[in-house]
Image: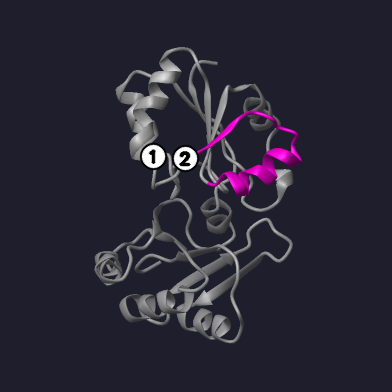
Amino acid sequence: MSKLYLVPTPIGNLEDMTLRAIRILKEVDHILAEDTRTSGFLLKHFEIETKMYSHHKFNEHKSVEHIADKIKAGESYALISDAGTPSISDPGFLLVKTCIEMGVEIECLPGATAFVPALAVSGLPSDRFCFEGFLPPKKGRNKKIQALVEEERTMIFYESPYRLLKTIELFIEYFGEDRKASVSREISKMFEENVRGTLKELHAHFSAKTVKGEIVIVVGGKNA
């Protein structure tokens, strides 16, 4: 048990929590959580009483070596994010990198991550794809999209509901309004929605409604 466990948590439906994930979270000495308030509801639901500590992008630089030292001394830690698999557009990469450099064993459990179901139901080619995560803020967004204009693989992006329309508008500007795409939101939840069509059609659809929930945008590659 003296290792770092990366434990995926449900992205919506609590029934997606695996039996193994529950067991590991009960057996480790410590749990590192992106937001202890959010994860507190999850732990309470599954009657997990393991001590939990905050580990997020604002404090991880100060603590990763200390955590790795603790694991080398014989303690076990589990890292969880608010939803999905740690380090996939969530905190975790720096801790994993430090543990590898310090010779600490790491184990990642299989489990939920939002882009896989979004890609699977998009109807776009899934044999080759590139995951871009969240686009850079402000100035870097246009530059990043410009660099993807010639990309032939299916592209996957995470986005906030507040920026969805502006992002689709940028995609139209650089990829063209007829490029095929899919938008998935509230994946695995009661009001899950998957909308497919051209970028122009998607913009019209989401312009006519209030958008809530986490967003995954899947865009077909050039000539797809």
Q: Is residue 37 magenta?
A: yes
Query: What residue lies at 59% left-to-right and 39% top-to-bottom?
Result: 111
Q: Say which quarter of the image contains residue 137.
A: bottom left
- Give residue 149's position: percent from left, percent from top: 28, 69
The numbered dot on residue 145 is none
Task: From the viewer's side, name the closer residue of 167 and 30.
Answer: 30
Q: Say which quarter of the image contains residue 24.
A: top right
Instruction: Give the colour scheme shown.
Output: one colour
For label 1, count other residues whose C-alpha is less than 10 Å away and answer few (under 14), some (14-19) or many (20+). Answer: some
- Give residue 33's position: percent from left, percent from top: 54, 40
| Dot 1 and dot 2 residues touching (CB under 8 Å) | yes
Quadrant including the N terminus: top right
Task: From the viewer's side, name the closer residue of 114 and 9.
Answer: 9
The residue stretch that appears in magenta? 35-55
First in sequence: mark 1 vs mark 2: 2
Circle 1 sits in a helix, a strand or a loop, which is it? helix
From the viewer's perspective, tell me whether residue 124 is left or right of residue 210: left
What amino acid is labelled 1 in the image?
Glu
What amino acid is labelled 2 in the image?
His
Instruction: List the residue tagged with mark 1.
Output: 60
Q: Is residue 84 magenta?
A: no
Task: From the viewer's side, name the closer residue of 181 and 76.
Answer: 76
From the viewer's perspective, tell me whether residue 138 is left or right of residue 155: left
Query: What residue lies at 34% left-to-right and 18% top-to-bottom?
Result: 103
Query: What residue lies at 57% left-to-right and 48% top-to-bottom?
Result: 83
Query: What residue lies at 30% left-to-right and 68% top-to-bottom?
Result: 141
Instruction: List the residue tagged with mark 2.
Output: 55
Count of picture labels: 2
157 is higher (above) or lower (below) than 207:
above
- Give residue 119's position: percent from left, percent from top: 53, 57
Quadrant including the C terminus: bottom left
For label 2, count other residues whose C-alpha is less than 10 Å away and answer few (under 14), some (14-19) or many (20+). Answer: many
